[in-house]
């Protein structure tokens, strides 16, 4: 399996940070929203960000 370069590692790290922050924000807004449709959309978006975060983390772990 090819090694991850330091540049790629930095980019993946930035993506992880971005996905984590987006997840936290969407999760927060889903708990604050009064409108059921908005609450559901924010929950769905939070789940999507969590899945992308987990996929990136799994990719990193597979290249250790």
Image (cartoon, helix red, strand yellow):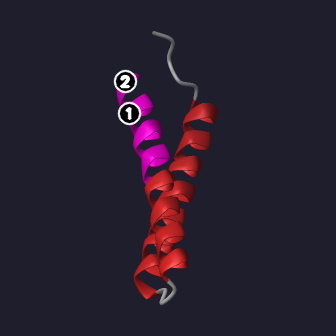
**Residue beneath the point at 40% across and 43% down:** 54
- Would you name the residue on which mark 1 appears? 58
Residue 2 location in percent, x, y?
A: 51, 12
Query: Which image quadrant is residue 62 in?
Result: top left
User: 7 or 14, which is in the foreground?
Assistant: 14
Residue 22 in picture, x, y percent from top left:
54, 64
Say which of 59 and 37 sits in front. 37
**Towards the viewer: 4 or 51:** 51
Give percent across and percent down for residue 9.
Answer: 55, 36
Q: Position of residue 44 (x, y in %)?
A: 48, 60
Q: Residues within 10 Å of mark 1 (few under 14, many from 20)?
A: few
Q: How many marks?
A: 2
Asked if the residue at tag 1 contacts the one at tag 2, i.e. Cβ–Cβ closer than 8 Å, the answer is: yes
On whether residue 11 falls in the magenta region, the answer is no
Q: Residue at x 35, y 30 (%)?
A: 61
Label 1 residue SS? helix
Instruction: Give the residue at x 43% y 72%.
Output: 27
- Residue 60: name its quadrant: top left
* Residue located beneath label 2 in the image: 62
């Amino acid at each position: 399996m090819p090694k991850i370069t330091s540049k790629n590692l930095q980019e993946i790290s930035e993506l992880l940070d971005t996905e984590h922050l987006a997840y936290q924000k969407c999760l927060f807004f889903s708990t604050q929203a009064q409108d059921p449709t908005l609450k559901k959309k924010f929950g769905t978006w939070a789940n999507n960000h969590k899945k992308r975060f987990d996929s990136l983390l799994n990719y990193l772990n597979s290249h250790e």
